[in-house]
Image (cartoon, helix red, strand yellow):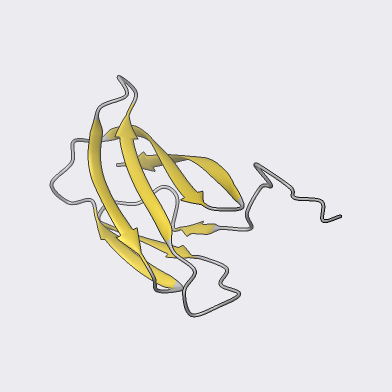
Amino acid sequence: SRVQQANVPLSIKAYPNATTRWLYLQLPRQTDHDHYTILLTNLLGQVVWQSICFQSTIRIDMSHLPKGSYILQAHHPTGVTIRPIVKW
């Protein structure tokens, strides 16, 4: 029998944090079909940016967002990673 792991933390890098404009994400990929659903929410839980990503590096333009704290969520079939992000 095969054992499946659920909600395994993913080794996602988000930099620079804090940022004034660009936020870069490094996403681990094991196959060409790996994909992530990326959500950036404000502290009220409102989605301010989202995308389905197949690349291993993503650049998010945060210049249109007000200064403050945000929550980055990276959803992958093997787990979810959540990171606090600061825009200043």
Question: In the rendered view, does 29 fall on the left or right side of 16?
Answer: right
- Position of the C terminus by quadrant: top left
**Residue displayed at 56% across by 45% down:** 81
Report whether 76 appears left or right of 63.
right
Q: In x, y percent, where is residue 4?
A: 75, 50
Q: Where on the picture, by quarter, is residue 46?
A: top left
Q: Residue furthest bottom?
A: 32
Name the residue at 34% across, 23% down.
43
Q: Is residue 82 left or right of residue 55?
A: right
Q: Nearer the viewer, residue 12 or 76?
A: 76
- Outermost residue, right side: 1
Q: Residue furthest top?
A: 44
Q: Nearer the viewer, residue 83 or 21?
A: 83
Taking 44 as reference, is 10 left or right?
right
| Image coordinates for residue 59, horizontal then vertical, percent | 31, 66
Task: Check the image and report above or below for 9 versus 48.
Answer: below
Residue at 65% over, 42% down: 7
**Residue 57 location, x and y as percent?**
42, 72
Count the marks: 0
**Looking at the image, which residue is at 38% across and 52% down?**
37
> In the rendered image of this protein, does residue 28 appear above or below residue 49?
below
Examine the rendered structure and indicate whether residue 5 appears above or below residue 11. Answer: above
The quarter of the rendered structure image containing the N terminus is bottom right
Which residue of the protein is positioned furthest toward the left in this rendering? 64
In the rendered image, residue 39, in percent from the top left (x then y), is placed at 34, 44
